[in-house]
Image (cartoon, rainbow, N blue to C red):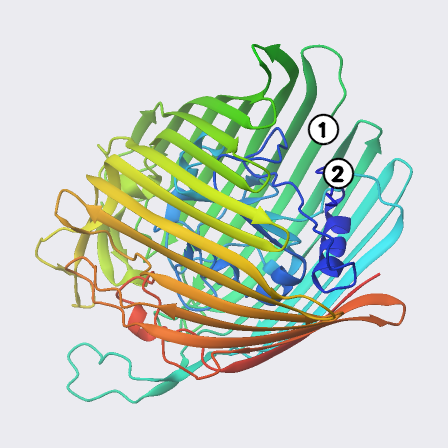
Amino acid sequence: MTRISSRAPLGALSAIALLASTGALAQNTALQPVIVTGNPLRSEQLAAPASSLTGTELALRRGSSLGETLEGLPGLASTWFGPNANRPVIRGQDGDRIRVLSNAGASLDASSLSFDHAVPIDPLVVERIEVLRGPAALLYGGSAVGGVVNAIDNRIPRAPLAGTAGVAEARWGGAAAERGLSALLETGSSGLALHADAFWRRTDDLRVPAFEPPAEDGSSERPERRTRVRNSASAAQGGALGGSLLWNHGFLGASLNSYRNDYGIVAEEDVRIRMQRDQLALAGEVRALSGFFNTLRAQASLSDYRHEEVEGSGAVGTTFKNRGGDLRLEAVHARQPLGAGQLEGVLGFQAERARFEALGEEAFVPSTRSRSAAVFLYEQWQLGAPLMLSAGLRVERAAQDSAGDADPAEPRFGPALQRRFSPRSASVGAVWNLDAQWQLSSSAAYTERAPTSYELFAKGVHAATASYEQGDPEQAKERGRNLDVALQWKQGHGLFKLGAFWSRFANYIALVHAGLPEHVDDAGDSLPVYVFQGVPARLYGWELEGRQRLWSGPCSLDLEARLDTVRGDNLARGEPLPRLAPLRATLALHWQLQDLSLKAELQHATRQSRVPGDDQPTPAWTQLHLAASYALRLAGADGLAFIKLNNLGNQLAYNASTVGTLRPLTPLPGRAVMAGLRLSF
């Protein structure tokens, strides 16, 4: 089996994986890059469940958002606030329990504050996506108690580049009539590597099977059926420049990237979000040091995020700003003999600061300043080939400061307030190689999460969810216990993996219906009142995935299957937690003959009837998707041409993870053809 070094340049890694998965390399060659997210020691074995997307698989799954790209993978769903604002959901958890990273650094934005706020990362320029399912608070803080999504690129080159290389991709079609272009260029010589990339994407209102939206409040007329999700078009573009100085045992680099997106808010007919984010990132590493610590890593970033919510008249209703930075330091110590094995580990420090402002009539949170600093220790004990044990501890200090009312003449949020928290997290894990094919892994964690600014200080009408939301300034830390167990068999082209998880929270901060009289806004509309409240809660479920070769020869035929489910309960109220995906099943047949690959995938989601009292069940649905790809040579470049036909039967479907007030307005995409061409040289 051929392996790619964890220190290989990411651009080269993506190109090699692209060729391998389309048949340009020998079919029996398996390329399995080491997962780097949540893996500071770059171990080939992880106790926590993890997965990655790269190469052809990523090219065929790319959507206009990270949530859409990852939707349907084991344990993963999306918030689906239309095609533009679509954040990943892992095992039923979203918002500030899922950490979205860019090259393992913070992605500063406002996406966790509201479902209509997009993540400023476009999959068109991402080379690999890594996902950790389950708590990763030990390494990334309380915002990762549900998992991590890490979008990886090579904007800061980490290894030498020989000569000049590039990738260009064009795609057209889909239910949103997408027109997308992206390009990447890298060059280097001894001691220097440079990177540049850019992307451009335009979409129209999303085309869906005919559906009947809910009637307007107070109207007795039956609304007209629609075949488009209104106000869902978008226009996004961005790019980056980066470079590194490299030597035999390390690198030092920087990048500057910019992201722009102008998209419609599907909850409102004529309101658009005009978003921009600029970020400066720094990273460096020194290896092969003498002494106790043999590797030092550092990375930092400064981000300036802003978005304006623009009314149909052109007037700016509300402006959101978030400025801040993060710093991460890791010191890896050399392997030390301990008993019958070898001990290696990492000592780390992480700090983040952000200043958030919400200005305008629809601001439902005050301006706040957030700060956190943490130290963590992670150790791994390798007991020969069969057994690896791990353990870690994190101690953190976090602060949330509310500026209170901007205008004392218009009291709303009250006086300025300060809250301080000291979250702590710990984890243990084990990987046991039973034999050459079977592996058993398990991890257990205790996590604490400091409340976010909106869980503490929110007070006002949240237009995106058509509700009045209220935080609790006396909110306590969220505390949880988690257990993960997985059994895996792997031989040749065959794979079987079964995993189960269980989480119990002593103070799960949930947004629950208050049961109070409805709030009447300035327009005279009545809105339900929701409060952020700590409740005992439980989440549990399982994930199954498998792959088996049915036929080998000049051509190959593989059967792939996925099955997952999650259940969650608010134990204080004796009702289900909201927005959980139902039992989902996927069956796929993958046929390959040299450079030609064909795939048929059948997806089914069962009816989700386990919902809280303020939500409605989501009907079951089944969709069939077809895809074809062909590896080719064009003008001296290696290429991949692909075509996808999604939702062949044009079946109407809704996402159970979408907030209930918006779900009837945003069905999943209808039947559509997407075609694309990707060239690398």
| Three-letter residue code for mark 2 | Arg
Residue receiving disc 1: 285
Dot 1, crowdedness within 10 Å: few (<14), some or many (≥20)? some
Residue at 25 percent across and 39 percent down: it is: 508
Dot 2, crowdedness within 10 Å: few (<14), some or many (≥20)? many
Q: Please say whether residue 602 is visible from this viewpoint.
A: yes
Q: Quadrant of residue 333?
A: top right
Q: Please say whether residue 409 is visible from this viewpoint.
A: no
Task: Give x and y (percent) for residue 352.
Answer: 50, 32
Q: Quadrant of residue 283?
A: top right
Mark earlier in primary sequence (2, 1): 2
218 displayed left or right of 337: left
**Label 2 residue SS:** loop
Task: Give x and y (percent) for residue 20.
Answer: 73, 58
Cα gap from disc 2 to disc 1, whole angstroms: 8 Å
Residue at 53 percent across and 66 percent down: it is: 262
Seen from the viewer's position, the closer of residues 64 and 72 is: 72
5 displayed left or right of 248: left
Residue at 43 percent across and 62 percent down: it is: 309
Seen from the viewer's position, the closer of residues 626 and 425 is: 626
Q: On the rendered image, what quadrant is the C terminus found in?
A: bottom right
